[in-house]
Amino acid sequence: MAFHADHMPLRRPANADRRSALFRERPFDVVERWALGVGWSLMPSRIAGLPRLWKMCFDDALAPDYALPDPERALDNPPGLAGIVHDLTLPTLLAAYRRGLYPLAHIPPLKWWSPPNRSLLFFKNLHISNNLARLMRQHRYTVTFDRDFEAVIAACAGRRQGRWHLTWITPRIMRLYAEAYDAGHAHSFEVWNAAGELVAGGYGLACGAAFSAESQFAREKNASRIGMTVLNWHLAQWGFHFNDGKLMGPLWEAMGFRDVPRAKYLGKLADAVRQPGKIGRWQVEADIDTVSRWQPAHR
């Protein structure tokens, strides 16, 4: 299927009161995030990068640079640190993604990142395990796109069982990506069980033919894998060049993501963002059973 622009009308922003309730941190949550963020920074594997981080912050305080940094000049330690975020508006966010930068910080200051290796899924490499395919054909779940972005991003920022509650998805970040969603650039997938409960989901940002996965959550085993697989099927059919997972992890590796050096990634990104893009609300165009039988290498 050819890649095309989507001109469907955008949905009006969700109720402001609902967003205000979902996109918030209690005072205890703020203190906890700061404490865990400091602890995370002081871990032995990261503490060596603190002097250069402090120098960047000091230099920026003396002479703030409001331009987007050069992703190819990011630091080696901390790996991928490119600059300090000053202007966190939607136009700046979109411009940053087109350059291969993304914002992230557990505690201030918010920083731009461009890691030395990027975890990318080229759709011919997507792996759907036999167990996952069987689960998808049991018709226990339904997948939708852009039905409840607010609930998805709030769940991604929420607590995870058995894990410390350390998140970079702060209310500031949630409001920004919700604005991107209202403008048709950010998108969510939702996974619903037979009882109609939201049991998994994820969200990301599309620029041209590049999609950047931001975060996902799951309340039932393998539910988020189903949602991500359905999303990748659609991205491939719509002509996207790749799904950018940013940093490699066990889930990405199992699905077929591969590390790509920064220079190669930036070249592929430049080609992808020149495409017209698919802006607007997305809709699922194939059922889960069809996606479960997908053989990407033979497309």
Image (tube, rainbow, N blue to C red):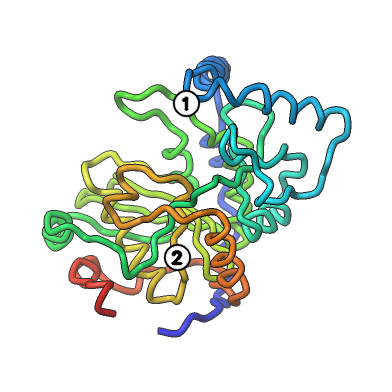
The percent position of residue 158, horizontal first and vertical second, equals: 43, 32
Residue 49 is left or right of residue 57, and the answer is left
Q: Is residue 118 above or below residue 63?
A: below
Of all residues, the one furthest to the right in this rendering is: 63
The percent position of residue 99, horizontal first and vertical second, equals: 65, 58
* Residue under the image location 34 percent in, 50 percent down: 252
User: Which part of the image, by quadrant, shows the C terminus?
Assistant: bottom left
Tag 1–tag 2 contact (CB < 8 Å): no
**Which secondary structure, mark 1?**
loop
In the rendering, which numbered label is found on residue 166? 1
Q: Is residue 165 above or below residue 64?
A: above
| Amino acid on which disc 2 is placed | Phe
Which of these two is toward me, 99 or 207? 99
In the rendering, which numbered label is found on residue 242? 2
Sequence order check: which comes first, mark 1 or mark 2?
Answer: 1
Label 1, residues with CA under 10 Å away: few <14, some 14-19, many ≥20: many
* Residue under the image location 50 percent in, 21 percent down: 40
The percent position of residue 34, horizontal first and vertical second, equals: 57, 18
| Amino acid on which disc 1 is placed | Leu
**Which secondary structure, mark 2?**
strand
